Amino acid sequence: MRMRNVVGVVQVGLMCGMLIACRTGDEVEVRGRITNGSGPASQELSGAEDAWGGPGTTAATAKVRASVLEVDGQAKVIAEADVDDQGGYSLKLDQSYVRVILEAVGPTGRTRASALLDSTQPAPGQDVRTAPPMSTETSLEAEVYAQMVRDGVEPGNVDTVDLRLRLTSRRARAVRLSSDIPGALRTLSMAVRAAQQARISAYAAPGSVYFNKAELLSAPRDAASTLDLALDSGTTSAAKAYADFFAARDAALPMHSALEHQKAERDAGMVFRAIAKQACLGNDCQWDTSLAEIHATGAAVHFVLGQAGASALQPSADAAASELFSNLATSPANAAQAWTTYRARILDAEDSVLYRWAEDAGANRETMRSLVQAASGIGATLGVVMSELLRQDVSSSSPEALAQSINQTFTNYTTEMTRIVGFNLGAAGISAQTALKLMLITQEAARP
């Protein structure tokens, strides 16, 4: 039996994974490259000589500087290296570090782009740590991390792997086009901090059997280093690279089930969107869902089907999740439609995973249809409630109060779904728990 471990709550900063740097006694090499890429932010941007990467960055860079942030927010330079004609560089560090900021620096000392390195530990099987290619998106990640420390968050309490998953190229575009970039960075700093607090609270909620904050922060770093290597090499698609990353991250956190991950990402994602909307251009990135939230939803459905002995349906559910990921990656502006399509493939469509599972279990199809419709109605109501929350000004709300409000909304939704749908599932002649879990997971994902 696993026993609840809350040591991580009180030992913040005492383990190597929670410190700014960890000495190993060995020299570390970090290699990387600077790109001219900036995703959707490559056009119609003013201020070409800013620190956000994009066209011309490679040619304008003279060297790369590596720094770590002290508790007071001051940067401590730990290495510098020249940049070759193709934008490549190689840094030699005297020891291993975590949470390293890499900056592309011009001849005058101006930062042209940056990136955030979760740790200098090489990917498994590698002798050299490969950094993520510098771009507009990675520059936002480094800027938000620095802003969080300036805002008073200790570096050792920032989950940089999580931070990087939440900040998309669309958000980078919105910030770079903002008339108040410092204000946008402060907003995203608060949003990431609140999301990470909500995520940790979900893992440490009453009823959970294990929680260790240090493990939660440090365990995914090997997966992140492998992801950076894959993104740099370009030998595999981004979708495949991220799929491999999430599989490795989940394997590094075996103490938590897929359902625990799903609830944590559900709460954190909603908290993040409620605050981060203020740093968007209109609706351009208001409804952005993190890749972690997408993965956690699909993984939870896969898990529930496995528990129900319905492994034959797992490929169909996984295919729906893969399609969702692809749709959001290629057409993020159509997020609402992408999630609607996913819900239909799991719940609503005539050949949905739920209907096929129910038929295999000998359930009455008409009864199931009415219950699915009821579940969809309750899910739509949840979406309306969350939409209203997203439209409110939460700038004066504390992260803790906002997280508690969102968690309570989800709790009320679960209670209502259980009361109306769960109570009547027995009439369909099937296991209420499996059907109810599939409905809950799918209807509550990425609301509104």
Image: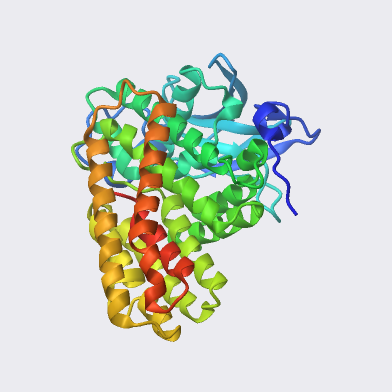
Residue 90 lies, with reference to residue 149, above or below; the image says below
Left or right of residue 314, residue 251 in this image: right
Residue at figure coordinates x 57%, y 22% from the top left: 154
In the rendered image, is residue 71 in sight? yes
Q: Position of residue 107 (x, y in %)?
A: 44, 23
Q: Quadrant of residue 363?
A: bottom left
Residue at figure coordinates x 65%, y 31% from the top left: 9
Find the residue positioned furthest to the right: 25
Q: Nearer the viewer, residue 144 or 312?
A: 312
Q: Nearer the viewer, residue 123 or 167?
A: 167
Residue 347 lies, with reference to residue 180, above or below; the image says below
Q: Position of residue 178 (x, y in %)?
A: 24, 28
Q: Quadrant of residue 14?
A: top right
Q: Nearer the viewer, residue 64 or 179?
A: 179
Residue 211 lies, with reference to residue 227, above or below; the image says above
Residue at figure coordinates x 30%, y 23% from the top left: 395
Q: Position of residue 136 (x, y in %)?
A: 37, 38
